[in-house]
Amino acid sequence: MSENLPVFSSMINGEWCGNSGETVTIYNPANHQQKVAHCQYADGELAKYAVNAAETSFEKWSRQPVKHSISILRKAVDILEENAELVSRTITLENGKTLRESQAEVDATIRDARYQLKAVAETDWRIPANIHDSDSAHYVQRESMGVFLLITPWNFPLATIVRKLVPALGFGNTVVVKPAQLTPGAAGHWFEFLHQAGLPGGVANLVLGRGSIVGNTLINQPKLSGISFTGSTEIGLDICRKVSARSVRLQMEMGGKNAIVVLADADLDKAVEATVLAAFSCAGQWCTSTSRAIVEEAVYESFLNRLKSRVESLKIGDGMNENTNMGPVISNGQRNICCEAINKARQEGALLLTGGKAIRAIDGKTGFFLEPTILRDVLPNMSLANEEVFGPVLAVISVKNPEEALELANATVYGLTFSVYTRSAEWADRFINEIQAGVCHVNLPTAYREAAFPIGGWKESGRGVPECGDEQKHFHTRLKTVYRSPL
């Protein structure tokens, strides 16, 4: 490790723990030859130590005045803002997304954190009972719960950590964070900022390592009060099964097969832009991306022509290049999954409209590049219409009318986000009321969100209490009803 690269390790009980397991090198997905960091993995014993440290710290932290907790977290967010460029570059180098996308992630993280801090500050911890009894003092009080395990993905390696951690700590709990092993840098920077802000040791603990080793160890710790997870449906449901017999509160944001419906009366230019934005930003690697475009047949060909032209104008390359519109996917394994899905769709009869090829090198840099891909004439029974791909691969499906579009939009096991483009208030209301998804949009992209609103999936896209918005206080606290007669 003589290349003068950053070295990221676990932080437990306020100290960087160094190497207790293996040390791995992180490479730039846009350039296999570029080492960007070294990561020292924890082992199972360190994972247990992290939970014990969080449990030991809980009583003192939960009794701190809320204003004190908020002031520390606010300072950490301020430090993040001061170091936004450093963190953005780290995200791009480890994840591959464009620098503009990484900067947008950091900006959104700061907005979310400040909203959550304001929400915590305004929360009523004691709620008077609304009863007509002048001789009593009955009330409901809100209390912190304990240790929360936060498991976060590689596609938004900063945003998901902060939006889980800030309300958890703000409401008096302690946490253990297990980020994705492919993108440790953003987590490492954030924990350094928490340390600089004066967060007491043990209140927030970072465990870096392989999910098969430290992840399973953490999930099986009996001292956990809650688990907040963002990732695949397969892993999320496995976690649910493992803790089903325990009193562990769950917040699970899982997979999706999100649809944008384009009706015949839609503004096609706006619908195309929304589709391109949500399907191909971050190389299509986000839970709320658009992976199905369901288009009324009256405008099907016109929509496809505009979409093809727009997608073929995208410049693929290294995310650090300011001219790049779409970076690589995260790994060779992820690219192989995308290519297999494309090939299977074509074998089943879908037609390739554009893209579809892995790109070995761009500007002399060998990376995990994949052309943004559109497959047309996808049928409802094809795999691409039903299975999550998590990459820059879009299925376009023709339907005869809005009723068929609604039926098809609901015809998957997933239910995370949805969008409909139409000028009809009647049809907009119909889709809002009948769509089976946790987040619904009218004339906005499937990935659009506001900090004040919750995000949570229906069906196989989620379990438990949604993330973000006002729901955070319901997830991170419990209620105690108090009946008091005069003393």
Image: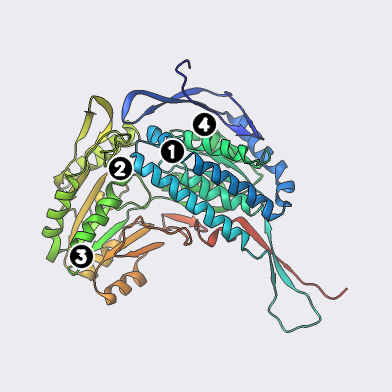
For mark 2, does the 10 Å Cα neighbourhood hold few (<14), some (14 to 19), or many (20 or more) residues? Answer: many
For mark 1, does the 10 Å Cα neighbourhood hold few (<14), some (14 to 19), or many (20 or more) residues? Answer: some
According to the picture, the residue beneath numbered tag 1 turns out to be: 85
For mark 4, does the 10 Å Cα neighbourhood hold few (<14), some (14 to 19), or many (20 or more) residues? Answer: many
Amino acid type of the residue tagged 3 in the rendering = Asp
User: Element type at marker 2?
Assistant: helix
According to the picture, the residue beneath numbered tag 2 turns out to be: 283
Q: Nearer the viewer, residue 312 or 246?
A: 312
Mark-to-mark CA distance, 2 and 1 = 21 Å
Residue at (52, 22) in percent of width and height: 22
Residue 189, compared with residue 139, is above or below; it is above
> What label sits on residue 209 in the rendered view?
4
Image quarter of the C terminus: bottom right
Marks 2 and 4: CB-CB under 8 Å? no
Picture quadrant of residue 409? bottom left
Mark-to-mark CA distance, 2 and 3 = 25 Å
If you read the primary sequence from the N terminus, does the residue marked by circle 2 or circle 4 appear first? 4
Marks 4 and 1: CB-CB under 8 Å? no
If you read the primary sequence from the N terminus, does the residue marked by circle 4 or circle 1 appear first? 1
Mark 4 vs mark 1, foreground winner is 1
Whether residue 240 is visible: no
User: Element type at marker 1?
Assistant: helix
User: Element type at marker 3?
Assistant: loop
According to the picture, the residue beneath numbered tag 3 turns out to be: 267
Where in the figure is residue 481, as x and y percent of width and height? 71, 68
Mark-to-mark CA distance, 4 and 1 = 26 Å
